[in-house]
Image: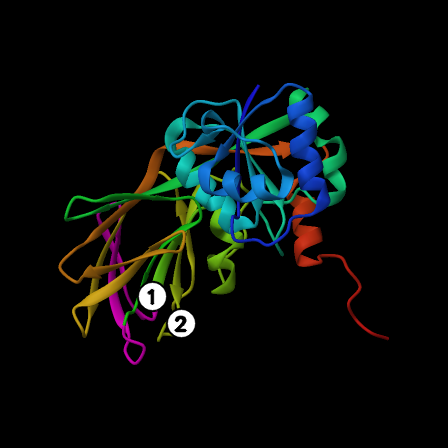
């Protein structure tokens, strides 16, 4: 079984279970290949005696990818995997982590679970953003347009399936997938969607109109954005990767032709994740 290993190379230390899992996978015959930067980092800690062939800069075919870190690391893993649709398992070495919900106490048995195939995969929608100057970018969570000048607002003329929806006057606008509904979209008042929902969220960021609210649309619809700002530029963020864009450049956002496959362990569920991460059902009222 060929397994790609990704991780946060800037993290000073990982839980002991991470090192034990890697050692156990190697002992049980898994073919481990490490993202070069992370491999060099963890090799110093574990003395794995990694060879050149054990490291990779570009992803090739594999049975599984493991992402050690937080949700940001998993998003980077998803970007690296691209349209190869290699299943990704996120192992939480950070904080909240909706995508990386495998915890340290689960790592001792994880090698046998993975090598035994005792898991399922979920297909997650990916956004494809095409710019009018010919670029194509992808995002698992969201694509956002944002003001560049801290003192001003932007206007975002928005059309859905070719029909005018609204011109948002706001600090920005984001288009989120169901996966991204628990990320940036949630912080601006967007709804939580089930991961397998065939929908997208259009949500304004600090709208200057109280009448404007997030909107849920089918993921088969295309979205066109034209942005106007005072200084002639705006920011575009695809899963947090920022670029400065000229006002003259328009965006078309649609569902990509491939999915990201997220591994779900047999004893995990989205509802369990919500209860754990958002403390749903917890008694937080002091008597």
Segment colored magenta: 149-172
Left or right: 33 with respect to 250?
A: right
Left or right: 285 with respect to 169?
A: right
> Is residue 117 visible to us here?
no
Query: Eyeballing the image, is 278 above or below 150?
Result: above
| Disc 1 element | strand
Q: Are marks 1 and 2 in contact (CB under 8 Å)?
A: yes
Q: Main secondary structure of the magenta part?
A: strand
Disc assigned to residue 172: 1
Which quarter of the figure has residue 246?
Answer: bottom left
Question: Split into 4 quadrants, where in the image is the N terminus?
Answer: top right
Q: Is residue 37 rendered magenta in the image?
A: no
Neighbour tally class for label 2: few under 14, some 14-19, many 20 plus, Cα within 10 Å: some
Query: Eyeballing the image, is 47 above or below 241?
Result: above
* Residue nearer the viewer, 100 or 18: 18
Left or right: 36 with respect to 147?
A: right
* Residue nearer the viewer, 39 or 75: 39
Question: Split into 4 quadrants, where in the image is the C terminus?
Answer: bottom right
Disc assigned to residue 206: 2
Which quarter of the figure has residue 222?
Answer: top left
Query: Eyeballing the image, is 49 above or below 270?
Result: above
Q: Position of residue 197 (x, y in %)?
A: 50, 40
Residue under the point 53% across and 41% down: 195
């Amino acid at each position: 079984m060929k397994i790609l290993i990704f991780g946060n190379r800037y993290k000073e230390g990982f839980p002991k279970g991470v090192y034990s899992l890697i050692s156990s996978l190697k002992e049980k015959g898994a073919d481990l290949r490490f993202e070069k930067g992370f491999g060099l980092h963890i090799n110093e800690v574990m003395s794995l005696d990694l060879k050149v062939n054990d490291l990779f800069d570009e992803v090739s075919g594999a049975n599984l990818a493991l992402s050690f870190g937080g949700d940001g690391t998993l998003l980077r893993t998803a970007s690296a995997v691209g349209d190869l649709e290699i299943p990704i398992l996120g192992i939480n070495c950070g904080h909240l982590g909706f995508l990386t919900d495998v915890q340290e106490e689960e790592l001792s048995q994880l090698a046998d679970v993975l090598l035994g195939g005792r898991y399922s995969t979920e297909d997650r929608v990916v956004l494809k953003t095409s710019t009018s100057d010919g670029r194509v970018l992808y995002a698992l969570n969201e694509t956002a347009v944002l003001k560049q000048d801290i003192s001003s607002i932007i206007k975002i003329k928005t059309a859905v399936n070719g029909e005018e929806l609204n011109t948002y006057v706001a600090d920005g606008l984001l288009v989120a997938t169901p996966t991204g509904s628990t990320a940036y979209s949630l912080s601006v008042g967007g709804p939580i969607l089930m991961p397998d929902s065939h929908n997208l969220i259009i949500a304004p960021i600090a709208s200057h109109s109280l009448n404007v609210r997030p909107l849920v649309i089918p993921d088969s619809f295309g979205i066109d954005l034209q942005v106007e700002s005072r200084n002639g530029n705006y920011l575009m963020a695809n899963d947090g990767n920022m670029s400065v864009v000229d006002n003259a450049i328009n965006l078309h956002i649609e569902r990509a032709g491939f999915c990201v496959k997220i591994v779900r362990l047999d004893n995990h569920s989205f509802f369990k994740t919500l209860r754990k991460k958002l403390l749903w059902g917890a008694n937080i009222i002091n008597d």
